Amino acid sequence: MRSRTPRRMGAMGLTALALLFLATGCGPEYIVLNPAGPVGREELHLIELSTILVLIVIVPVLALLAFIVIRYRDRPGNKAGYTPEWSESKWLEVVWWGIPIVIVGLLGYYTGKSTFSLVQPPEKDVKPITIQVTSLDWKWLFQYPDQKVATVNYCEIPTGVPVQFVLTSDAPMNSFWVPQLGGQEYTMPGMAMRLWLQADKPGSYFGTGANFTGKGFAHMHFQVVAKSDSEFNQWVQQVKSSSPALTMAGYNKLKQPGTMGTASYSSYPKNLFDKIVWKNGGRYMPDMMMDQGLDANMPGMSGMGSQTSKDSNTHS
Amino acid sequence: MPQWLHTFGDQYLMWNEGPLIWISDVLILLTGFGIVFVLTYFKKWGWLWREWLTTVDHKKIGIMYLIASLLMMFRGGVDALLLRTQLAVPNNHFLDAEHYDQIFTTHGTIMILFMAMPFIFALFNIAVPLQIGARDVAFPYLNAISFWLFFFGALLFNISFVFGGSPDAGWVSYPPLAGPEFDKGPGENFYLLALQISGIGSIGTGINFLATILKMRAPGMTLMRMPLFTWSVVATSLVIIFAFPALTVALALLLLDRIVGTHFFTMAHGGDPMMYINLFWIWGHPEVYIVIMPAFGVFSEVVATFSRKRVFGYTSMVASLLLISVISYFVWAHHFFTMGAGADVNTFFAVASMAVAIPTGVKIFNWLFTMFRGRIRLELPMLWTIAFVPCFAIGGATGVMLAAAPADYQYHNSYFLIAHFHQVLIGGVVFGMLAGMYYWWPKMFGFKLDDRLGRYAFWFFNIGFYVCFMPQYALGFMGMQRRMYVYPADMGWNTLNLVSTIGAYLMGIGFLFIVAQVLYSIKYGERDVTGDIWDGRTLEWSLPSPVPHYNFAVIPTVTSRDAWWEMKQTGQIQALRPSADEIAPIHMPKNSGRPFILSACFFVAGFGFVFEWFWLAALGLLGVVICLILRAFEYDDEYHIPPHEVVETESALGRL
C-alpha cells in the first residue's frame, strides 16, 4: 500500500500542474498566451513545446523524490532495501545522460528553426509597411516613412499586413514589446534594428518599454491599434488633415526627459529617424538599408557606410 | 544650522531625502557607538585585533565571511521587502521612482556579490583545508587580503546608502544609462569601485583555492579520492580565475568613461555599449555557476552523509562539474538574444544554454540515487537539500524554456525571468549555502543549531518562496516587465502581486527564525563533543569541534574516497590519533595586520575615486603601494608550534 502513495501523489501533482497551466492559459489577461498574430503564435508554440519537453524530465524527478524520501526514511523497522556501498550503474547513468541529450537536441532543433523563420516577414506575398520607432526619455515616437505621419505613445497598423518595426533610441536603451503581437527587441542609440510583427485581427494591444531607462520608465506604455486596411488609411488621412506638424524644434522638445500622453503629427522633419541614428554614432546595417530602401535618401551615406560597415556586420 | 553644514548635509548626507535617511543615520550612529562602547567596556580591542583583524587562519576567515554574508543577506532582504511592499498594490506611493530604482539596484548587487560570493567563500574556507588534510590554504596571507578586500568593498557599497547616494542603474549597470550622460553623481561610482575592490579579492580566492587543492592534499588523496565539495571548489576556482578579469576590465573602462571622459562605451565617439554588455555577461553568466557549483558540492556531501550511503556516480559528478564550468563560457549571449544578434548567433547560444541542463540533470539524478536504498535522516542540512531538488529542477526547467531564443523574446525582462533566476539562485544557491552552514556549523563553533527553530525557518522560507515567486511566472505571461516602480491597476496584475508580496514577508519571517535560532543555540544548542556529530564521511569529521588552529596534529594518510567513513568502518580511527612522540613541530603562518591595512588603503582610494577627490585617491593608492613594498621585504612571517604545545592541546581534547 505504501509504495502506491507516492505514485498517486505524483499523479495528483501532475494533474494540478496541468490544471494550473490550463487555467492560466484561458484568462484573457495572460496576454503572452493569447497571441493576436503569427509571430506571437509561433513563439507560443515554442513555449508550449518547451514546457512539454521539460515536463518529461521534471515529473519523474518530483515523483522519484517523493517516493525515495518516503520509502527510505531512517525509521526503526523500515524494511526497504539498504545498500550503503552501491554507487555505480552504467545503464542507469546512460539513461540520464541520454534522455536530456535527446530532449535538448529536439528543443534545439525547433528553436533554431523558429529563430531563423522569425527574422523573415511573417507573410511573404503581402507588401509590408514600415514603422520607425524611437524610444525617448520616457515616451515612444513612431514615424511612418510611407505615410509620412508620426505619433507618440500609440501607433496604428493595418491587420493582416506584416509590419517592419525599425527600432532605435535617442535615450538609454529600451526594449520594444507588444506581447500579443510577439516578443521584444531592444532599441539602442546609434543602431537601427528590425522586428517583424503582424496583427491578424483588429484590436488594441498593450505595448510597453521592457528595459529599464530611469525615473519615468514605468510609465512607458503604449497601445498598438490594429484595424482594417481602409480604416487604417482613413486614420492616416485624418492625422494628416487635423494634426499639427512635428518640427525639429518640436522634436528637440519632445526628447526632453518627461512623460506625456499620446500625440499625432501630420508630418515630421525629413529623414528625422536617420538623423537620430547618425547623431548617436550611427551604425546602420548595410543589408538592412537595402531592405528598407533607405540608402537613396540618406545624404553622405556612402562615406559613413564604408567607415562603419566592418562593425555593423556584428549587429545585422 | 550654518549654511555650509546645510549644504554638506543635503549634498553628501542626503538629508533632503527625508525620514528614511534620518532614521538610518541615527541607527548607524547608535550601532557604531554601541560596538565601540562594548569593545571598550569589556576591553576587547586587543582581542579583536589579535584574534580576528590580523588572523590568517582559514577557519576564522571563513567565520568572518559567514557573518558578513548573513549581514548582507539581511540588508539585501530588507531591500527586497521594500520593493515588494511598493509593488503590493498598483500605483503605490510608498516609494518614489528614484528610491525604488536605487533599492532594486542595491538588492541585486548585494545579493549576488556581497551575499552569495562571501557565503561560498565562507564554506570554501571552512571546509576545503579540512577535507583535503591541510593545515591552511596555500597562501594564508593572500586569503586574509581577499577577505578584507571583500569586506571594504562591501563597506564602500553600503556607505552609499547614507553618504553620496546609492547607484540606480540596475545591478547590470548598462551604459549609456550608467554612463556620465544619464547618471550623474557618485552613486554609480560607488557600484563600480566597490565591485572592483571586492573583485580583486575574489580573483585572489580563486587562485588560492586552486593552488591549495592542487598542491596541499594529504598523502594518498588523489584527485579522484577528493570529496565532491572540494571538486566543486576546483571547478568554481577555475571559473573565477577566467571570468572575473572580464568584470574587472568592464568596470575599469566604465569608470574611465565616467570620471576621465573616455568613450569606450559611448557610440557617439566610436565606442560601443555592446562591448560592456558582452564583457559584463562573459563574467556574469559564469558568475552564476560560480555561486551554484559550491552549492552542488554541499548537496553531494550532505546527501551521502544523511543517506548513510556512498555518493552515486562519483565520476559522473566530477565530469558534470567540469562540463558545467566549460559550457558556462559559451552561453553569455543568452542574456541579450533581443539585442540584434543574428539568427545564427542566437541559435548557437540557445543550444549551448540548453546543454547546461544535461550535466545539471545528471547531478540531480545522481543525488536521487544516492538517497535511493539509503537511510535518510531529515536533519536540517538534509531538509534544505531535499527542498532544493524540486525547486532547482523547476527553476532549471524554466531556464531551458528561456534558452529557446524566440520564446525568450517574450520572457526577456519580464517577471517570468525574475521568477526563474530567483528560483535557481534561492532554490539553488541560498538553499545550498544554508545546508552547508547547518552542516559545518558544529565544526566551526562546536555546537549544533537548534532543530525546532530551524524547522520553523525552513517551512516559512520554503512556503514563502513558492508563494512569492510562482505568481511571478504568471505575471510574466501577463506582460508585466521588471524594474517598474508602479504598475497600472487595469492589467489584472493586482492579486498576484499582492500574493507575491505576502510570500516575500513569509521568507522574511523565515530569516528571522534563522537569527533567533543562532542566538538561541549559542546558549542552548547541543554541544558537539565527538567532532563527528553527523556521523560524517570525510576528513573534517575526524577532527574535534571546533578544530585546533593547526587542524591536524599529524597529517593523515588517505587510502580511499570517504576516508573517515572507511576508517570508521575498518576500525582504524586510531591512525588519526597519533602518540605523543610522533608529533613534530608544526609549521604555521604568522598573523599580520597588513592585509587589513592594505585593504583599508584600497577603501580610501576607492572613496576618493567615487567623489573624484583625486588627492584622496592618490593617498589611498600610495598606502597600497607602501603596504606591498613592506610585504615584499617581509621575511619573518612563519613560525613553528613546538610539539609540547600540540601535545598539550591534543591531550586537553582527550585525543592522546
Image: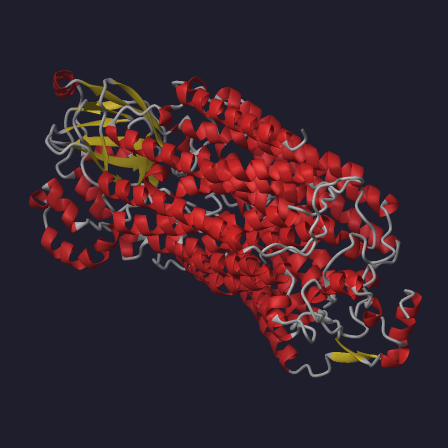
Query: In the image, is residue A164 above or below residue B432?
Result: above
Q: Nearer the viewer, residue B227 or A128?
A: B227
Tell me if residue B607 can be seen.
yes
Image point (79%, 45%), residue name: B449
Answer left or right for B43 relative to B421.
Answer: right
Answer left or right for B332 relative to A79.
Answer: left
Q: Nearer the viewer, residue A72 or B31?
A: A72
Residue B641: quadrant of the picture: bottom right
Answer left or right for B439 relative to B422.
Answer: right
Answer left or right for B117 relative to B511.
Answer: left
Q: Nearer the viewer, residue A37 or B414?
A: A37
Query: In the image, is residue A43 above or below residue B592?
Result: above
Q: Nearer the viewer, residue B466 or B555?
A: B555
Image point (47%, 64%), residue name: B242
Image point (65%, 73%), residue name: B138
Residue A3: quadrant of the picture: top right
Q: Position of residue A252 (x, y in %)?
A: 25, 36
Q: Position of residue B656 (x, y in %)?
A: 91, 70
- How many numbered discs sit on the rendered protein? 0
